[in-house]
Amino acid sequence: EEEEEEEQEETAEEETTEKDGDGDEDEEAEVDDTPKPEFKPPPVVPKEENRTGANKKTYFVCNDPGKSWIKLPTVTPAQLSTARKMKKFLTGRLDAPVVSFPPFNGNESHYLRAQIARISAGTHISP
């Protein structure tokens, strides 16, 4: 008789454990009912190769006559789109950071190169 009682107690414990487990699954199902955002960030546009597109020409700058010329870096599509959205005065120091909104990825030499690319793309000389 004692063995039968122990078996009944064990089965009763198993049933309560299963019921508790089922309750956890219901709670998880309720949490999973929340809608998930469908936003996916736009794909990154790859950088153009040299001598094509916006990087077709190479530009050099100089602050004072007689000093050495400095070659401007190539421009990326992300820098072009950010430069189009912002207005910022140039300081004349090519290594100065560009603090703006939206944030610009690069220093002043990259910003200057992006503005030159925008101007040259929008300007045509007709004879």
Image: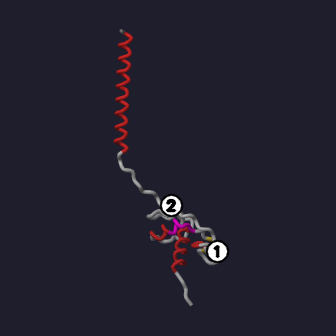
Question: Relative to 29, is 95 above or below?
Answer: below
Residue in the image at 35% along x and 17% along y: 8
Q: Secondary structure at mark 2?
A: loop
Tell me where residue 30 sits by quadrant.
Answer: top left
Of residues 21 and 120, the one nearer the viewer is 21
Residue in the image at 52% along x and 61% along y: 44
Residue at the spot of label 1: 67
Residue 117, how many percent across, how many down? 55, 74
In the shown orientation, is residue 104 left or right of residue 20?
Answer: right
The magenta stretch spans residue 78: yes
Tell me which secondary structure the magenta stretch mostly adopts: helix
Of residues 63 and 45, the one nearer the viewer is 45
Kindly identify the amino acid type of the residue bearing the numbered disc 1: Lys
Q: Quadrant of the N terminus?
A: top left
The magenta stretch spans residue 68: no
In the shown orientation, is residue 116 left or right of residue 38?
Answer: right
Residue 20, how many percent across, how many down? 35, 30
Tell me the magenta residue range: 75-80
Residue at the spot of label 2: 43
Residue 39, how many percent across, how many down? 42, 57
Question: Relative to 36, is 18 above or below?
Answer: above
Gap in angstroms between the C-alphas marked 2 and 1 = 42 Å
Instruction: Give the numbered dot on residue 23.
Output: none
Residue 19, how many percent across, how many down? 34, 29
Of residues 25 and 95, the one nearer the viewer is 25
Q: Quadrant of the C terminus?
A: bottom right
